[in-house]
Image (cartoon, rainbow, N blue to C red):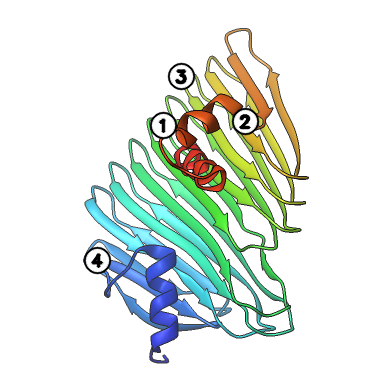
């Protein structure tokens, strides 16, 4: 296991809000290798035999504990795919923090693809935070293609915060979920693209159990000549409730394609979708500019508030 250097430590701080080694369980990864790992009495982390990821097992009844699994890439040309499986026992209440920071100062493309699967036990509750950032002044691209699968048992709750607001040239995010009886899923996505960046988010949620519910909301901003596609789908196979919302700001010569869809296969499936794309309202800019802000400063204030 390698030691973490100063650059990698700074990148980990930015992607996972870590200013020191976290308390609780963690697995820190840099440039394709593990640079730190800790387990607890209730949370075990083991490398997969194939060496391409980890298994995280959380004992039933575990509460008020956390798992941090951030990744940083600071070598140009490095490409990796990592498979991480989470097995969350019944009646848990835990925080899981993931995410990746690519700092590419070279001419070759760098890519990290994290494949995460969550198996959530009965009446368990997890909060999952995933942040993606890109940086570096090289010509090589920063590419992130994450895939997340969530399988929820009866009465479980999953809250997911997906954030990508800086420096990622290309991303294709796919999130799939299956919910059992009385399970609840809440997703909040925040996305900003600029330059010639391309981002696609695909969400497919299947409500299979009576009383299950899903609330999927995406807020995004497309600047310069960037392109976004938001594909949100909820399938109701039982007496359930589902809501999707795409709320986007378009600027400059940006392009946004929103594709919300609903599929009801049960007479008691209550599904709703909303989609709105528009520019920043002129009256908002004028109001802030009368307080002494320049137009550019006013735009930034509005965007920051929108994506908060």
Residue at 57% over, 9% down: 268
- Is there any visible trace of residue 48 in the rendered image? no
Q: Earlier in the sequence, mark 2 or mark 4?
A: 4
Q: Earlier in the sequence, mark 2 or mark 1?
A: 1
Q: In the rendered image, which quarter is residue 142 located in?
A: bottom right
The residues tagged by marks 2 and 4 sit, at their Cα atoms, a distance apart of: 35 Å
The residues tagged by marks 3 and 4 sit, at their Cα atoms, a distance apart of: 34 Å
Q: Is residue 298 left or right of residue 44?
A: right
Quarter of the image that includes the N terminus = bottom left
Disc nearest the viewer among 3 and 2: 2
The residues tagged by marks 2 and 1 sit, at their Cα atoms, a distance apart of: 28 Å
Q: In the rendered image, which quarter is residue 274 located in?
A: top right
Residue at 64% over, 13% down: 266
What x and y, as percent, mark residue 255? Answer: 77, 42
Q: In the current view of this chain or complex, which residue is farthest to the top? A: 267
The residues tagged by marks 1 and 4 sit, at their Cα atoms, a distance apart of: 27 Å
Q: Earlier in the sequence, mark 3 or mark 4?
A: 4
The residues tagged by marks 3 and 1 sit, at their Cα atoms, a distance apart of: 10 Å
Label 2 close to label 1 by CB (< 8 Å): no
- Packing grade of label 1 (10 A; few <14, some 14-19, many >=20) is many
What residue sits right under mark 4 in the picture?
24
Disc nearest the viewer among 3 and 4: 4
What residue sits right under mark 3 in the picture?
211
Disc nearest the viewer among 3 and 1: 3
The residues tagged by marks 3 and 2 sit, at their Cα atoms, a distance apart of: 24 Å
Label 1 close to label 4 by CB (< 8 Å): no
- Secondary structure found at label 4: loop
What residue sits right under mark 1 in the picture?
154
Q: Earlier in the sequence, mark 3 or mark 1?
A: 1
Q: In the rendered image, which quarter is residue 121 located in?
A: top left
Label 2 close to label 4 by CB (< 8 Å): no
């Amino acid at each position: 296991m390698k030691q973490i250097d100063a650059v990698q430590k700074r990148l980990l701080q930015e992607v996972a809000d870590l200013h020191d080694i976290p308390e609780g369980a963690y697995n820190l990864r840099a440039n394709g290798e593990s640079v730190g790992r800790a387990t607890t009495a209730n949370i075990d982390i083991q490398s997969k035999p194939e060496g391409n990821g980890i298994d995280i097992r959380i004992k039933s009844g575990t509460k008020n504990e956390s798992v941090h699994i951030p990744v940083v890439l600071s070598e140009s040309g490095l490409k990796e795919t990592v498979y991480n499986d989470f097995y969350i026992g019944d009646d848990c209440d835990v925080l899981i923090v993931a995410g990746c920071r690519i700092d590419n100062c070279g001419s070759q493309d760098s890519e990290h693809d994290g494949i995460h699967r969550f198996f959530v036990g009965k009446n368990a509750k997890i909060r999952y935070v995933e942040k993606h950032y890109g940086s570096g002044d090289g010509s090589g691209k920063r590419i992130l293609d994450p895939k997340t699968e969530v399988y929820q048992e009866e009465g479980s709750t999953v809250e997911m915060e997906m954030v990508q607001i800086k420096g990622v040239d290309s991303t294709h995010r796919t999130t799939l979920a299956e919910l059992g009886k009385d399970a609840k899923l809440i997703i909040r996505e925040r996305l900003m693209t600029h330059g010639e960046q391309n981002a696609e988010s695909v969400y497919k949620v299947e409500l299979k159990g009576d009383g299950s519910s899903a609330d999927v909301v995406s807020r995004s901003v497309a600047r310069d000549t960037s392109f976004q596609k938001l594909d949100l789908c909820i399938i109701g196979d039982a007496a359930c409730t589902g809501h999707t919302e795409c709320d986007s700001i378009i600027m400059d010569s940006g392009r946004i394609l929103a594709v919300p869809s609903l599929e009801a296969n049960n007479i008691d499936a209550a599904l709703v979708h909303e989609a709105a794309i528009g520019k920043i309202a002129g009256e908002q800019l004028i109001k802030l500019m009368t307080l002494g802000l320049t137009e550019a400063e006013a735009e930034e204030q509005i965007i920051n508030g929108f994506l908060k």
